[in-house]
Image (cartoon, rainbow, N blue to C red):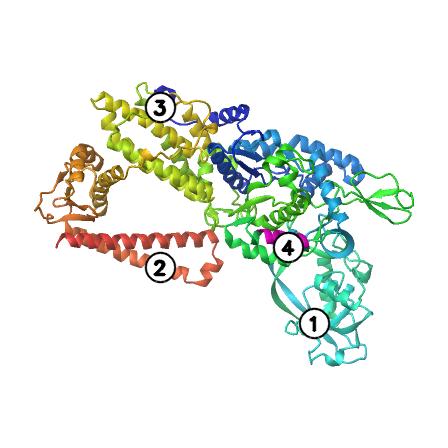
Amino acid sequence: MTELLDKNFNPAEAEPRLYESWEKSGLFSPDPAQPGESFVIVIPPPNVTGNLHMGHALDNTLQDILIRVHRLMGDNALWVPGTDHAGIATQAVVERSLAQEGLTKEGLGREEFVARVWRWKERYGGNIVQQLRRLGASCDWTRERFTLDEGLSRAVREAFVSLYEEGLVVRDDYLVNWCPRCLTAVSDIEVEHETRLDSLYYLHYPAEDGGPPLTVATTRPETLFGDAAVAVAPDDPRHAGRLGGRVRIPLTDRLIPVLADAHVDPQFGTGALKVTPAHDPNDFQIGLRHGLPRLAAIDQRGRMTALAGPYEGLDRFECRRRMLTDLEAQGLLARAEPLSHAVGVCYRCRTVIEPLVSRQWFVKTAPLAAAAAQAVRDGRIKLTPASWEKTFFDWMDNIRDWCVSRQLWWGHQIPAWHCRACGRVVVTREDPDLCPDCRGPLERDPDVLDTWFSSGLWPFSTLGWPDDTADLRRYYPTTVLVTGFDILFFWVARMMMLGLKMTGQVPFRTVVLHPLVRDAQGQKMSKSRGNVVDPLEIIARHGADAFRFALASQAGQNRDLKLSPKRIEGCAKFVNKLWNAARFALSNLEGQRLAPPARPLALPDRWIRSRLRAAAAQCRQAALTFEFDKLAELVYRFTWDEFCDWHLELVKPILHGADPEARDASRRNLLTVLADLLTLAHPLMPFVTEELWSKLPGAEGLLAGGRWPEPREADDDPEAERLVGFLMDVVRAARQARADFGVPPARKLSPVVKTDDPALAETLTRHAPLLTQLMGAADLRLAGPDEAKPKEAAANILTWGEVWTPLAGHVDPAAEIARLGKEADKLDKDLKAARQKLGNPAYVDKAPPELVEETKERLADLERRQTAVARTLELVRALER
């Protein structure tokens, strides 16, 4: 049978072939009329501009594990794929392409530019989809959706118009987060905050009455041209005499009032706050309370307006630099102090956000957020891990209205028309011809909707909403959403709000929030650090199975994932270990086919079936509770430790023995256990397991369409587990003695087993030749009833008795104590040096992070070695007693 398997698995050849066979089989495309409990996942749609990155790889590996497990369990399992039109990102890509041709979107006009983007999408937009196939993602590609396809566009329009009709969508002048580079408004959660070291500037505002100037502290002196007032705390005695008076804005002749407002913190700066309603959200609210004008000193491109006088047209930061020189020259800059503070930047291009007053479309989110929060509070939606609930509630309970309009051309154009004659705004499901009031001409609103609005409808729009489709009835609400915690508010919360509002049902039952993928040192991957790892390169080098297993094995719910080359290489070895175990099994089948094993079975066969029964139950539970790392650990331990290291060794004498009935029973059992093992490992490592399944004599169909191993009561065998556990204890004790005392493999030991249990004694006698071989021992015997432990023997005391490993002639206690003492002294010195280094703040704060992490790892390794040396010293000293 070995000619059926090459020496090593070849992922590059096998993976495309196997994926094609899965896709052609139709296994990924469930029928809503088929039986089985619905298990549904919608993919977090990657940007159509994107290529597979580590976040995608982890996200989709975990989803694929779940969908494959539930498919094997007989559920009607659907995984809906698709891509997001990614308004800002896609428009930017195409604009850069146009620039290389010497063209601009304005020169092309809206209609031709959008046509260009569609052509780009058709040419390049499928890259990420093909890359997901390389990862092994078993999505139903027949149901693939795009957020700008015809059906989803109709869903977006229906949702927007419905919200507008209920008064939950409004258009108003309001302070928004504006990106001067992307030239569009962005919502609050699309603003990321970076800690930066800036200065707090203390500026003198001369008093109108000629008295002492009022000193105001600000981080943004360039906005003073838009000041409408200076505010002080109502009960601040330092400024009580200023109220009702006026001061002059530095570098101008304009006078503004001094007023009292409770928002002012008397402990910050001088307790006097410049109020610029057009450039600060808090100032905007103060302006509303006091009826102050909104004066824009900075325009949408981040340049100074005519209000700035001689600084008009300058970039806002260049203006700041020149102003500071002029303020100091005129004696209006009192001082500057260093200040570390959070600065808002655009999550796309990292440009500093400029708060600007603009007429935009908003969704009133308070009632929607309240309903979503209640769904989590009453358990209709479960967040996993639950530690995210507090953050979720804090955000939802204090949510602000959502600015949904974007000043872009690529996206869902807002279905609103403005009458040029009477000013009427018409929002409708169908394109209108004339104003319904005055029959005047209409002009469509130029803005498009925030990308997150369309993706907020994703769980139900992809299933056919607003139509009443068979998919919607069968598969909605969806079962579980798997995504990164970093888009809990970008996307997950919005799906909750819109799903409940539009359908009256939760969009999913459970949200699994997975960690971030970091590099081997725990650093966030970024191009600037040069530590970005390309998943496609890993797949090309090691295969998708090793990569998937490496990701899953570290996907704990409460810690970030550190991905190292060493970890991936270890997982590649595991794939090879499984392959070689299957090669051994297939080479020993002698014509057996997949069928239930004959009874009675030998002890090693009873034991592995009992362990398989436990492993299948534990793997099932780990998958159902989203413990991906535990699932990987269970599969690894059962495959490597129990099946490969023990069962294959224990069963060799039977497979090669003279009893034909025993041989046939063990061969058939080996085949059935291997088949079930491949099924358990399949969700984690689909390619290698499918390839091996195809080589099993009697295996039918594709493993991807198989069935999860059902627990069989007859396989539960505590006595077999006790007896084989005893044999394992004996071997481990002898191996431990060899390792503890540094006995080289060439020296043969002669362990002695002391037990009063007749069943254990009989088991040891029957398997002694094999155990002797596994231990690399000269011989193995049972101790007599009154026999005492030999002098100079290592002793392992166990629940059933003892294992003595005589070391006389193998270990010189005095020499070993001297050697270990020297090693302990050296470890003490190295530990002291490492602790001193890590105790030095200058090193920890200033050294490269990877070097600090390396020092921490070295310290941990030294501490482990110190513990081991101390233990061995104690063991060697015991030999002399």
Main SS, magenta region, reads: helix
Element class at badge 4: helix
The segment highlighted magenta reads: 367-375
Residue 332 appears in the picture as rendered: no
Q: Earlier in the sequence, mark 1 or mark 3?
A: 1
Q: Earlier in the sequence, mark 4 or mark 2?
A: 4
The mark found on residue 370 in the picture is 4
Q: Nearer the viewer, mark 4 or mark 1?
A: 4
Q: How far is the residue under mark 4 from the one under mark 2?
A: 56 Å
Q: Is residue 310 left or right of residue 53?
A: right
Q: Between residues 480 and 474, which one lies in front from this camera angle?
A: 474
Residue type highlighted by circle 3: Ala
The mark found on residue 262 in the picture is 1
Element class at badge 1: loop
- Mark 1, residues whose alpha carbon is within 10 Å: few (<14), some, or many (≥20)? few
Question: Badge 2 is on which residue?
Answer: 833
Q: Nearer the viewer, mark 2 or mark 3?
A: 3
- Mark 3, residues whose alpha carbon is within 10 Å: few (<14), some, or many (≥20)? few
Are the residues tagged 2 and 1 within 8 Å (C-beta)? no
704 drawn magenta: no
Q: Position of residue 170 (x, y in %)?
A: 77, 52
Q: Between residues 187 and 348, which one lies in front from this camera angle?
A: 187
Element class at badge 2: helix
Question: Badge 3 is on which residue?
Answer: 595
Q: Is residue 60 left or right of residue 306?
A: left
Q: Between residues 40 and 452, which one lies in front from this camera angle?
A: 40
Q: Earlier in the sequence, mark 4 or mark 3?
A: 4
